[in-house]
């Protein structure tokens, strides 16, 4: 078969000499040194379009879930002056985020002095008007942590039995900033067992690679965790908490943790939390990842920051959600509905769609 180039049209003898005349004498010497080398050889030109146009699409679902967490148990106004503590502010931040594209809420409440509380009166001020407005179009994620007894920690989940559909389970013994946190096997197993007894799905929180192995040992291999797929959430990036300080490290950490999750239980789905400096970059990476990542938890609960390379603070959770929705759409994806999120999470959440 004859060798062919890609160029058609006028012969190069007509247009090349004026271009070469632009070279200095020294530049021409360098060019002449390589004169006569064999250039690219193209066989089978023009290209066969079939392999190109029939390249398969990636197996990535268009819907991507957004859960908003506007405040948690430790971020204070002294850290981010944009935070407020009243249940009305928390409620309005959640409603604005739902209107912006979120389909789920993670609920913490505070006393007016900023201290965390499990008082159901505050929870009702947040959750009741949200459920009244959005009904089954919002997934409520509780938080069974912070009590001095097992009963106290379970109280919000009991109070909102039939409304709260999921809740996180911390697995790690870790430092979060300069504060040590430690859970026991009995605490983890009891929380998971009780949650499942009232049809709430435990969300296994990964703060480090040890969290994954504790989940394997205490919950999965032991048979305590009954539902499939197993629901995980990766929450890393705060100081002393599987921290990363550049984009490459961030990619490596998430790749490693997600692969270890799949080693432990292939039938798993994963959420990624906005946590620490990673901020919108973490969320964008999650949206790019595809299966098993099904969504993000975002907001000011675990991150003050908008961007890893700037000092811009999260000023408003609905505005943050809107910005992320713009990123999702630029990637050809869209925010998932609560029903789509439940379907991705799997059993037993189908009962909440009825």
Image (cartoon, rainbow, N blue to C red):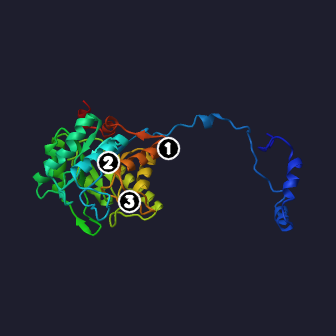
- Distance (Cα) linking label 1 and label 2: 20 Å
310 over 269 or under it: above or below: below
Q: Pointer 1: residues within 10 angstroms few (<14), some, or many (20+)?
A: few
| Mark 3 or mark 2, whichever is nearer to me | 3
Q: Which residue corresponds to mark 2?
A: 68
Q: Do the residues under discs 1 and 2 have CB atoms within 8 angstroms?
A: no
Q: Which mark is residue 313?
A: 3
Where residue 161 appears, as percent x and y from the top left, is 16, 41
Q: Can I make out residue 133 in this image?
A: yes
What secondary structure is found at the residue carrying circle 3? loop
What x and y, as percent, mark residue 301?
Answer: 30, 55
Q: How many marks?
A: 3
- Above or below: residue 204 compared with residue 54: below
| First-in-chain label (1 vs 3) | 3
* Residue in the picture at 44% in, 55% down: 281
Whole-percent x, y for residue 75 in the image? 28, 60
How far apart marks 1 and 3 lie (CA) works out to 23 Å
Comes first in the chain, label 1 or label 2: 2
Which residue is nearer to you in this view: 352 or 348? 352
* Residue with the mark numbered 1: 330
Q: Residues within 10 Å of mark 3 (few under 14, many from 20)?
A: some
């Amino acid at each position: 078969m004859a060798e062919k180039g890609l160029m058609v049209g006028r012969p190069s003898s007509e247009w090349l000499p004026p271009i070469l005349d632009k070279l200095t004498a020294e530049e021409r010497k360098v060019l002449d040194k390589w004169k006569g080398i064999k250039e690219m050889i193209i066989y089978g030109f023009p290209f066969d379009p079939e392999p190109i146009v029939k390249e398969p699409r990636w197996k990535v679902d268009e819907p991507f879930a957004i859960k908003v967490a506007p405040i948690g148990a430790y971020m204070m106004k002294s850290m981010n002056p944009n935070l407020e503590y009243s249940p009305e502010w928390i409620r309005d931040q959640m409603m604005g985020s739902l209107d912006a594209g979120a389909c789920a809420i993670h609920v913490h409440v505070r006393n007016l002095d900023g201290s965390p509380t499990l008082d159901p009166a505050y929870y009702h001020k947040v959750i009741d008007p949200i459920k009244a407005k959005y009904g089954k179009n919002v997934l409520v994620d509780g938080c069974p942590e912070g009590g001095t007894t097992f009963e106290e920690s379970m109280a919000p989940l009991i109070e909102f039995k039939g409304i709260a559909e999921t809740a996180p389970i911390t697995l790690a013994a870790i430092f979060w900033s300069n504060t040590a946190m430690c859970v026991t096997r009995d605490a983890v197993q009891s929380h998971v067992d009780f949650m499942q007894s009232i049809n709430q799905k435990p969300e296994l929180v990964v703060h480090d690679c040890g969290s994954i192995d504790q989940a394997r040992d205490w919950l999965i291999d032991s048979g305590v965790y009954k539902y499939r797929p197993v629901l995980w959430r990766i929450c890393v990036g705060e100081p002393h908490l599987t921290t990363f300080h550049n984009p490459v490290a961030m990619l490596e950490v998430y790749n490693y943790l997600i692969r270890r999750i799949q080693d432990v239980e292939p039938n798993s789905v994963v959420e990624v939390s906005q946590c620490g400096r990673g901020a919108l970059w973490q969320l964008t990476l999650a949206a790019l990842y595809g299966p098993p990542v099904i969504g993000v938890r975002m907001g000011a609960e675990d991150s003050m920051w908008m961007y890893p390379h700037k000092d811009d603070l999260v000023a408003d959770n609905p505005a943050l959600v809107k910005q992320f929705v713009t990123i999702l759409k630029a990637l050809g994806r869209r925010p998932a509905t609560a029903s789509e999120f439940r379907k991705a999470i799997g059993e037993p959440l189908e009962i909440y769609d009825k």
